[in-house]
Image (cartoon, rainbow, N blue to C red):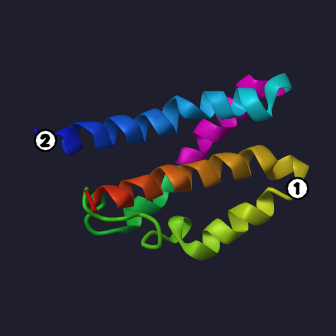
């Protein structure tokens, strides 16, 4: 196994599961546990992978490929930041997109 094959999933899943704790604590301190759980729930956005063939392709960039990872969807996630009731979910969705985008960059290493 190459270093990239080890580091990429380690970084990817750390960003998905561990870093949102820091985001929740930093931006939503009074309700950080709820914020963390909501951010974890935003991983349901990955259900759009079930519509792809194959469902998982380690060399595919999710951003711009899957419908809930499209640039239009990302624009909607930015709009959700404007509303207090959807802000935590928006942060979770946008960080999810950032996490998936960093996977796209591994192809250039």
| Residues drawn in magenta | 31-43
Where residue 81 sits, quadrant-wise, is: bottom right
Q: Secondary structure at mark 2?
A: loop
Q: Earlier in the sequence, mark 2 or mark 1?
A: 2
Q: Secondary structure at mark 1?
A: loop
In the picture, the disc for residue 2 is 2
Question: Residue 99 location in percent, x, y?
Answer: 49, 49
- Residue 18 location, x and y as percent? 52, 28
Q: Which residue is mark 1?
A: 83
> Crowding near pointer 1: few (<14 within 10 Å), some, many (20+)?
few
> Residue 56: where, in percent of width, then height?
29, 57
Residue 7 appears left or right of 23: left
Between marks 2 and 1 in the image, the one whose residue lies nearer the viewer: 2
Residue 67, above or below 23: below
Q: Nearer the viewer, residue 19 or 17?
A: 19
Left or right of 90: which side holds 45?
Answer: left
Q: What crowding class fits label 2: few (fewer than 14 Cα within 10 Å), some (14-19), or many (20 or more)? A: few
Residue at the bottom extreme, as displayed: 72
Which of the image's four quarters has the N terminus? Answer: top left
Q: Nearer the viewer, residue 37 or 47?
A: 37
State yes or no: discs 2 and 1 in contact (Cβ < 8 Å).
Answer: no
Q: How many marks?
A: 2
Residue 109 x/y as whole percent: 25, 56
């Amino acid at each position: 196994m190459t270093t990239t094959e080890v580091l990429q999933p380690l970084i990817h899943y750390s960003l998905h599961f561990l870093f949102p704790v820091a985001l929740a604590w930093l931006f939503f301190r009074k309700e950080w546990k709820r914020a963390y759980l909501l951010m974890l729930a935003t991983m349901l956005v990955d259900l759009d992978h079930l519509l792809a063939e194959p469902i998982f392709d380690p060399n595919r960039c999710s951003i711009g490929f899957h419908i809930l990872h499209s640039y239009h969807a990302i624009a909607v996630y930015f709009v959700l930041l404007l509303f207090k009731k959807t802000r935590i979910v928006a942060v979770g969705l946008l960080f999810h997109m950032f996490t998936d985008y960093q996977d796209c960059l591994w192809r250039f290493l």
